[in-house]
Image (cartoon, grey):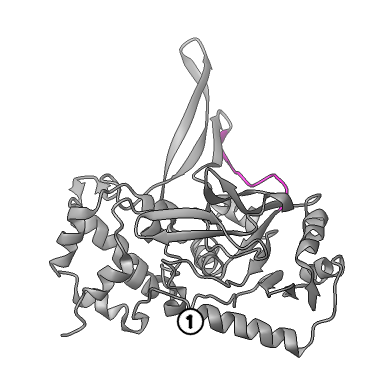
């Protein structure tokens, strides 16, 4: 189903969803667009973000444009795979050992305004958490009821390069609703039966070929606005040919090992776990042990990330940066048949040293 609505009538979508779903979308907080639980009034309407290497600035722009900003500072991954989450409880007693996987218990989530790059990142997350040897119980409990309200980009950020990886700016994966902002209206398209139901509650007008042509022209204009690109067709061979390139050491001298890039990256999924154990008993005789297993985000930039019994196999900063870079653009392609980078540019914007993945990639030789 397709519909055309007035921009202000988008509020009816929020009214329909907020009773049954927790709506996660963009809002302004401390002069930065972040993702949070929102209502229609929270949308950063008329804003635009100016991004460069290690720099972000939010300005009030054209009031008539609803979605002129690009990707937010964080990504939707933290709602599917929280930075700190209990994934398992366990108990042992005279009767034996028992385990209980933990699942999400709140309202189903509705991701509003998910861009093409983050939608592609979700594909990778599905492979990691759902298509391995074991499904992740917590992730699956959210994902199976997740509603996706996607948004085609009309104004890429200054650090975006999704067009080079074919992960944007047009949303191509599955969704429930897809929004494209035109000059005087919003074009709404359904991608599921639930999306059909949502469209029916909107005050709408019929869609004709003129509107579809306008959508095509908007996306073509957006494609021509990208300032950054990479030669994706040369990957992963380009990385493997340069594993011993001295450029890695040059980058490492600028790298702070802060892990900002892994925190904002929508595809990073590294974590560690620890047990919180309780010992219950009478006198000195322990009759029961119970506890929880907690999963927390980790980063391959952490010095202890590659620490194992007997040593550390990535002792140098150079080795840690090289691993992160190579996993994004080489290892992931072989491991999951998907790139570990979706071209959102967050790692460039939020790197305190302004290290630019696209520029560093250009510095490697593709010769034999």
Rendered location of residue 117, percent (x, y):
51, 69
- Looking at this view, is 143 or 361 the one in front? 361
Q: Nearer the viewer, residue 310 or 366?
A: 366
User: What residue is at 41 percent from the left and 68 percent from the top?
Assistant: 341
Figure quadrant of the C terminus: bottom left
Label 1 residue SS: loop
Mark 1 neighbour density, 10 Å: few (under 14) some (14–19) many (20 or more): few
Q: Is residue 241 left or right of residue 333?
A: left
Residue 162 at x, y percent in the picture = 46, 73
* Residue located 74% across and 88% down the image: 210
Please give the name of the residue rendered at 53% of the width and 55% of the height, measured from the top-left corner. Answer: 59
Q: Is residue 247 magenta?
A: no
Residue at the disc numbered 1: 224
Give the residue at the far left of this rendering.
Answer: 246
Q: Is residue 3 above or below residue 84?
A: below
Q: Is residue 281 left or right of residue 340?
A: right
Query: Which part of the image, by quadrant, shows the N terminus?
Result: bottom right
Q: Which residues are magenta?
A: 96-108
How many numbered circles are shown?
1
294 and 254: which is toward the camera:
254
Which of the 4 image quarters holds residue 208?
bottom right
Using the rendered image of the protein, determine whether residue 237 is visible from the camera's viewpoint: yes
* Residue 90 in picture, x, y percent from top left: 55, 36
- Any part of residue 97 in sight: no
Residue 268 x %, y %: 42, 58
Tell whether position 103 is magenta: yes
Question: Would you place residue 363 above or below residue 301 in this image?
Answer: below
């Amino acid at each position: 189903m397709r519909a055309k609505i007035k921009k202000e009538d988008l509020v009816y979508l929020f009214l329909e969803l907020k009773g049954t779903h927790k709506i996660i979308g963009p809002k302004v907080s401390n002069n930065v667009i972040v993702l949070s639980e929102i209502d229609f009034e929270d949308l950063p309407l008329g804003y635009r973000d100016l991004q460069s290497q290690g720099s972000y600035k939010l300005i009030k722009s054209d009031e008539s444009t609803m979605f002129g900003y690009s990707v937010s500072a964080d990504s939707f991954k933290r709602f599917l795979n929280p930075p700190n989450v209990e994934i398992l409880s366990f108990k042992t007693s005279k009767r034996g050992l028992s385990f209980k996987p933990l699942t999400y218990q709140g309202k189903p989530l509705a991701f509003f305004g998910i861009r093409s790059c983050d939608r592609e990142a979700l594909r990778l997350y599905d492979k990691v958490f759902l298509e391995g040897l074991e499904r992740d119980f917590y992730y699956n409990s959210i994902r199976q009821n997740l509603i996706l309200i996607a948004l085609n980009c009309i104004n890429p950020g200054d650090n975006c390069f999704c067009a080079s990886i074919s992960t944007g700016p047009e949303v191509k994966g599955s969704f429930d609703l897809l929004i494209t902002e035109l000059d005087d209206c919003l074009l709404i398209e359904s991608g599921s039966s639930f999306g059909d139901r949502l469209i029916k509650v909107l005050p709408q007008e019929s869609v004709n070929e003129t509107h579809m042509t306008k959508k095509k022209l908007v996306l073509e204009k957006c494609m021509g606005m990208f300032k950054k690109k990479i030669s994706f067709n040369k990957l992963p061979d380009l990385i493997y040919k340069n594993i011993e390139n001295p450029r890695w050491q040059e980058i490492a001298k600028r790298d702070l090992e802060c892990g900002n890039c892994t925190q904002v990256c929508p595809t990073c999924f590294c974590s560690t776990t620890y047990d919180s154990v309780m010992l219950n008993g009478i006198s000195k005789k322990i009759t029961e042990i119970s506890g929880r297993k907690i999963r927390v985000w980790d980063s391959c930039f952490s010095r202890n990330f590659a620490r194992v019994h007997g040593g550390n196999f990535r002792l140098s900063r150079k080795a840690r940066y090289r691993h992160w870079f190579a996993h994004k653009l080489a290892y992931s392609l072989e491991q999951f048949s998907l790139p570990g980078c979706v071209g959102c540019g967050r790692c460039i914007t939020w790197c305190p040293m302004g290290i630019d993945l696209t520029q560093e990639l250009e510095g490697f030789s593709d010769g034999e």
